[in-house]
């Protein structure tokens, strides 16, 4: 018992020494400002802009980000950051710090879109029909910027920062594959940033709880028995079944969802028959669904309504909830504690007015797979300024404001440091109470 007491006291002493050995990195506000100053330093800023432009010139689609991944790894090599590769085909996971818990993750997505760039500039996409039109080239760059600054302070980190460079955000669910391949092993929290043309430059927009909708698709084949349109009694008409299904689906939002929740069920495709006097064998319908809460339940109800309404009309229906390989994305939900922490860190870093309350958007993000597995926080980072206008993401006219890159890098780095710092403080507090109990 005495030995146990001595061991615990000694461990506690070590912990206190570790926490109180105030490095410049762990002294609060000043340091976080240092991250912004460091990131704005021309040496770091120009390096980031060079990387971003190189990525922009060579956009790659989901799960094909081989050159992007190579560039990330070569920069990590130059920085002396250890990493795991490949994860989910092209993904890279870097590690900075003690190599011990706690582990906190920062995430960037790497993929581009099937869009022909319409912006005429020196670093326009060199790949016909492909473009970084969602700013993921900026996201990769911001995370590399954070990696550079964190690596410089690696000996002062009170745990490990995990850098997640993931493939295939745009529809193919790269994050889901990363989670399945163990990207979040031992990780306690994760932070993600998306550049936004709607938020003013130098500000971040976020909210607690659901911030982006869950999104999914459905496609169903309704099969009956075709025949002569004038002799319906010898057929089983899938057109009537499909019509009834389309109308019944409308009642899911109007009758089953809370009117204060935002939900969408849209049937956007109906295909069947090609003659005026022939009842077809089958009809195919399809559409999209969006929801902030009850997403899985809504998917199940869509399936149920389709199959059961088909039965009413003596037809069979097969329902596919991942048509064309499109992964359904759950809603992106921000953890309340991480949201509070984020607000306080960003206010320290960028000023009291720097955090805006984000409106919920029916768009979706596969960051949701990470935030579903562990506590997560996703924010929009502003790049809108008064002198220029910035097009919507997924527009061929989309551009990013490169001046926002240091802000993203500094927010990433500050959040990771602050998270680890608070964990260490909590750890020492719980060690104390454990000791007191003895
Ligand atoms: Zn996008
Ligand atoms: Zn995006």
Image: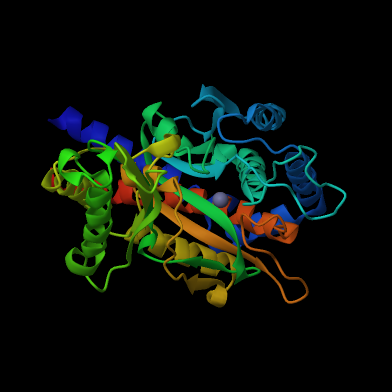
Quarter of the figure that contains the N terminus:
top left
Which residue is rendered at x = 35% and y = 42% of the image?
284
Residue 13, by quadrant, is top left
| Residue 64, position as x, y percentages in the image | 61, 29
Visible in this render: residue 372?
A: yes
Quarter where residue 310 is shown: top left
Residue occupying the point 39% across, 35% down: 101
Scheme of colours in the image: rainbow
| Rendering coords of residue 168 (x, y %) | 53, 37
Quarter the C terminus occupies: top left
Of 161 and 375, which appears nearest the observer?
375
Task: Name, please, the residue furthest toward the right.
Answer: 122
- Nearest the eye: 325 or 97: 325
Q: Is 232 placed left or right of 322 in the picture? A: left
Specify the farthest residue to the front.
Answer: 230
Residue 320 visible in the current orientation: no
The residue lying toward the viewer, choosing from 417 and 377, is 377
- Counting labels gives 0
The residue under the point 58% across, 62% down is 381
Answer above or below: position of 224 versus 197: above
Residue 21 percent location from the top left of the image: 50, 47
Residue 126's spot in the image, x, y percent?
80, 39
Identify the residue shown where x is 28% and y is 56%. 246
């Amino acid at each position: 018992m005495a030995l146990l007491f001595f061991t615990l006291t000694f461990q506690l002493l070590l912990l206190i020494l570790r926490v109180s050995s105030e490095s410049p990195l762990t002294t609060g506000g000043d340091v976080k400002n240092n991250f912004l100053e460091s990131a704005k330093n021309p040496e770091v800023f120009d390096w980031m802009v060079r990387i971003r432009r190189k990525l922009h010139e060579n956009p790659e689609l989901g799960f094909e980000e081989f050159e992007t991944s190579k560039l990330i790894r070569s920069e990590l090599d130059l920085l002396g950051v250890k990493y795991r590769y490949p994860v989910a085909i092209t993904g890279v996971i870097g590690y900075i710090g003690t190599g011990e818990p706690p582990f906190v993750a920062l995430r960037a997505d790497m993929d581009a879109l099937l869009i022909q760039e319409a912006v005429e500039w020196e670093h326009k996409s060199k790949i016909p029909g492909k473009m970084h039109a969602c700013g993921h080239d900026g996201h990769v760059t911001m995370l590399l910027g954070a990696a550079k600054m964190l690596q410089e302070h690696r000996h002062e980190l009170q745990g490990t920062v995990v850098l997640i460079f993931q493939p295939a955000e745009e529809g193919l669910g790269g994050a889901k594959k990363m989670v399945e391949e163990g990207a979040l092993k031992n990780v306690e929290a994760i932070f993600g940033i998306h550049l936004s043309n709607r938020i003013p430059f130098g500000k971040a927009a976020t909210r607690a709880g659901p911030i982006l909708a869950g999104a999914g698709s459905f496609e169903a084949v309704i099969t009956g028995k075709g025949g002569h349109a004038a002799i319906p009694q010898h057929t089983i008409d899938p057109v009537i079944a499909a019509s009834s299904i389309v109308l019944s689906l409308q009642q899911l939002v109007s009758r089953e969802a809370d009117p204060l929740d935002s939900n969408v069920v849209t049937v956007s495709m109906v295909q069947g028959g090609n003659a005026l006097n022939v009842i077809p064998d089958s009809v195919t319908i399809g559409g999209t669904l969006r929801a902030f809460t009850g997403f899985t339940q809504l998917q199940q109800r869509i399936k149920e309504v389709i199959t059961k309404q088909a039965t009413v009309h003596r037809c069979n229906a097969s329902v596919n909830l991942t048509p064309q390989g499109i992964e359904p994305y759950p809603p992106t939900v921000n953890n309340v504690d991480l949201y509070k922490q984020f607000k306080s860190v960003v206010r320290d870093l960028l000023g009291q007015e720097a955090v805006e309350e984000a409106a919920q958007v029916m768009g979706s993000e596969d960051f949701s797979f990470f935030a579903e597995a562990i506590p997560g926080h996703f924010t929009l980072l502003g790049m809108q300024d008064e002198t220029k206008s910035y097009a919507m993401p997924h527009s061929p006219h989309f551009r990013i404001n490169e001046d926002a890159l240091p802000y993203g890098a500094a927010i990433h780095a500050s959040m990771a440091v602050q998270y680890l710092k608070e964990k260490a403080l909590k750890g020492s507090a719980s060690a104390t109470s454990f000791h007191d109990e003895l």
